[in-house]
Structure formats: C-alpha cells, structure tokens
Amino acid sequence: MTQQLDRPATRTPVDVVTEFFDRYRERDVVSMTDLCTDNADFSYIPFEVWAKQRVVRGDGKVRTIGRVIWSGLINAFPDLGNTIHHIDGNDEGDVVVACDITGTQQSAWGFISAKGQYFAEPHLFLVHVDEDGLIDSIRAYWDNAGVNRQLGHFEVD
C-alpha cells in the first residue's frame, strides 16, 4: 500500500489534476503516482516501442507501465517539463488538460538515440478523478511523428 498525500476534502478534480502536473513538472514520479488509485488505468495512445522480441505499448496501469514510462522520460529528458494551456473539469470527475510537453534529450529514449535535440509537443490529457479525490484513469494523445521529427529520428520501414 502506498502512502497517500494529505488532501483537503474540498479539492476539486481540477485541483487534483493540477497538482499531478505540478508533480510531473518537478519530475517526482512517486508523488505523481500517490495522487492515483492503486489500480488506476493508464493509456498513452500513440506510445509504442519496438524491440527485437516484443513491442511495448502505453496501455496498462499507472503503477506499472505509467511509472516506467514517466521514469524513462525523466531519465532521457532531465529537463522534462509541461506547460498547461487549458484545464477544465466537471462534477463527475472528468478533467481535460491541453498542454505542451517539452524536453531536451540527453540519453536514448526507446529507439531514439540522443542527439541533444529539444522537443515541444502539444498533448491532450483526459483524466478522471474518483469520489475520494484520486486519479483513476489517465489517457493522453499527441503527434508521435512530430516528437520524432523534432528529436531528429526519421524511421523508414
């Protein structure tokens, strides 16, 4: 069982998700995960890394695949950041976040070798916060080809 962060009972879903992105900006994967339920769903729709014997996709749970992807991104992009342009939610716990994810690649990320390139790519996050004030679902969308292009990775089949 993970230790949950202290939260006032009056926090809105937007407050919870804003804190999540604050923790992401601080590159604090443990605190990001602590804002989520133990079984929170995770889906980074365009994420896919091909290896010789397997394909890793960005679908699973926050505490398994999410933590691995976030930690890998932070290692490869030590200045990984996010700038929120718009965040909105409803009373049912649904929150939409439009932001840019940014960073300068310092080590290999998946199949992309480090060339010291910077990327800034718009992302759309759909997040759900449960009645206990914890995130129970994270989905994200972005242009993966745009990220590859900015990092100087041009794959040809």
Image (tube, grey):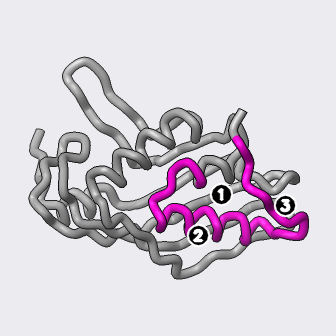
* Residue position for label 1: 127
Q: CA distance from mark 2 to mark 1?
A: 8 Å
**On screen, residue 120 above or below 59:** below
Image quadrant containing the C terminus = top left
The residue indicated by pointer 3 is 92
Local secondary structure at mark 2: strand
Q: Secondary structure at mark 1?
A: strand
The residue at the point 77 percent across, 65 percent down is 13
Contact check, label 2 and label 3, Cβ < 8 Å: no
The reply, left or right, for residue 125 in relation to residue 94 is left
Give the residues in magenta: 3-31
Q: Position of residue 63 (x, y in %)?
A: 58, 37
- Disc 2 residue type (three-letter): Val
Asked if residue 135 lies in the magenta stretch, the reply is no
Residue matched to label 2: 97
Amino acid carrying label 1: it is Val
Tell me if mark 2 has few (under 14), some (14-19) or many (20+) residues whose alpha carbon lies within 10 angstroms of its own: many
